[in-house]
Image (cartoon, helix red, strand yellow):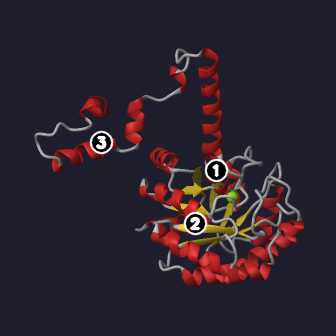
């Protein structure tokens, strides 16, 4: 099964699954290694890791470039946060063409205005995109994809924008009819009541994805029972990295030494492992002239253990 088919399966199969955020080739590799069956290429995390805001400050080609590094290092599917599609339906068509060429399995687009604002910042009703315009984008996306299993997720920000349950349901149904493979219903409530109400009315019409960041204390079993198909843990590798790097940087700065940081860092061998340095060492044996010493002989003993 190719990556698109794997993602399609994750979204359409019965039962709940989980994907975790990654924002570069390194974090994507870790997400796969621990056992996740998919990756969320988060717009917030990618932009933050590039040092810019989640307001479409990174261009779509810059996002694409990051996603390509992630896809090259992993064999599980990547669902890319496509924000609003970086413009109108036509910009989205081009984005999808390029995503497919770079081995990305699916994209999520949201019904907000370009440039978007992160959902945890202030979003009002007028930040929502026109419903019909969003439907046009969904249709254009589905007409553009080459792989029949490439996944198009339509995300409604109705709750985020304070527009309530009816708007969320109306939009979700319109996006389903326009051809979306799944609907992402975003909420930033402190508890899952918006998702609960939505699911009750939705009655398993079509696959549903949620992002439980603000209501993360709700047990996953609750969402399993509601019939949610996929949970996105949207930004936690980024936040772990920020915390770890801040503590480490401060410690080294304060101590003017590396004496107190061993417990905070991984072994260098772990870095080489994540880069699959072993593969290069093996390739050198096959392709370099015999008399040339292997470039990686220095670290080889560590990698072999
Ligand atoms: C992201 O991870 O960029 C998302 C999810 O879009 S959220 O930040 O909750 O909007
Ligand atoms: Mg985003």
Q: Is residue 130 above or below residue 35?
A: below
In this rendering, position of residue 296 left or right of residue 159: left
Counting other residues with Cα less than 10 Å from the Cα at mark 1, is it few (<14), some (14-19), or many (20 or more)?
A: many
Q: Secondary structure at mark 3?
A: helix
Q: Is residue 237 above or below residue 78?
A: above
Q: Position of residue 235 (x, y in %)?
A: 65, 48
Q: Which residue is mark 3?
A: 278
> Which of the two labelled residues, at mark 3 and mark 2, occupies the earlier sequence position?
2
Mark 3 or 2: in front is 3
Q: Secondary structure at mark 2?
A: helix
- For the question of whether residue 169 can be seen, the reply is yes
Distance, label 3 to label 2, CA atoms, is 34 Å
Q: Position of residue 214 (x, y in %)?
A: 77, 48
Task: Tell me whether circle 2 and circle 1 mark residues in contact (CB < 8 Å).
Answer: no
The residue located at (64%, 17%) in the rendering is 254
Instruction: Pick out the residue farthest to the left.
Output: 291
Q: Position of residue 194 (x, y in %)?
A: 82, 59
Distance, label 2 to label 1, CA atoms, is 22 Å
> Which of the two labelled residues, at mark 3 and mark 1, occupies the earlier sequence position?
1
Comparing 95 with 167, the one in front is 95
Q: Which residue is mark 1?
A: 45
Q: Quadrant of residue 80?
A: bottom right
- Name the quadrant of the N terminus: bottom left
What number is the disc on residue 190?
A: none
The residue located at (61%, 32%) in the rendering is 245
Counting other residues with Cα less than 10 Å from the Cα at mark 2, is it few (<14), some (14-19), or many (20 or more)?
A: many
Distance, label 3 to label 1, CA atoms, is 29 Å
Q: Which residue is mark 2?
A: 11
In this rendering, position of residue 166 left or right of residue 288: right
Mark 1 and ligand 1: say if the CB distance to the nearest ligand atom is below 8 Å. Answer: yes
């Amino acid at each position: 099964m190719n990556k698109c088919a794997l993602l399609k399966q994750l979204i359409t199969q019965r039962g709940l699954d989980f994907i975790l955020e990654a924002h570069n080739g390194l974090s994507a590799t870790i997400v796969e290694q621990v056992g996740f069956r998919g990756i969320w290429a988060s717009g917030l995390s990618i932009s933050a890791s590039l040092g810019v805001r989640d307001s479409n400050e990174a261009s779509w080609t810059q996002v694409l470039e990051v996603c390509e590094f992630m896809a090259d290092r992993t064999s599980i599917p990547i669902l890319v946060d496509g924000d609003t599609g970086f413009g109108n339906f036509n910009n989205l068509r081009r984005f999808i063409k390029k995503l497919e060429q770079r081995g990305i399995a699916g994209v999520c687009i949201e019904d907000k205005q370009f440039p978007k604002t992160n959902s945890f910042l202030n979003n009002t009703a007028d930040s929502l995109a026109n419903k019909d315009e969003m439907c046009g984008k969904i249709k254009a996306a589905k007409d553009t994809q080459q792989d029949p299993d490439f996944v198009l997720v339509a995300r409604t920000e109705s709750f985020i924008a304070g527009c309530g349950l009816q708007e969320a349901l109306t939009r979700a149904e319109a996006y389903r009819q326009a051809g979306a493979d799944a609907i992402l219903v975003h909420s930033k409530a402190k508890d899952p009541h918006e998702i609960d109400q939505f699911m009750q009315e939705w009655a398993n019409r079509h696959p549903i994805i949620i992002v439980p960041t603000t209501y993360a204390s709700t047990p996953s079993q609750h969402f399993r029972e509601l019939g949610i198909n996929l949970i996105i843990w949207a930004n936690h590798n980024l936040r772990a990295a920020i915390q770890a790097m801040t503590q480490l940087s401060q410690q080294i700065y304060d101590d003017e030494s590396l004496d107190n940081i061993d417990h905070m860092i991984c072994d260098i061998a772990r870095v080489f492992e994540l880069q699959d340095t072993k593969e290069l060492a093996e390739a050198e044996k096959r392709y370099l002239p015999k008399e040339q010493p292997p470039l990686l002989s220095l670290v080889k003993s560590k990698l072999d253990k």
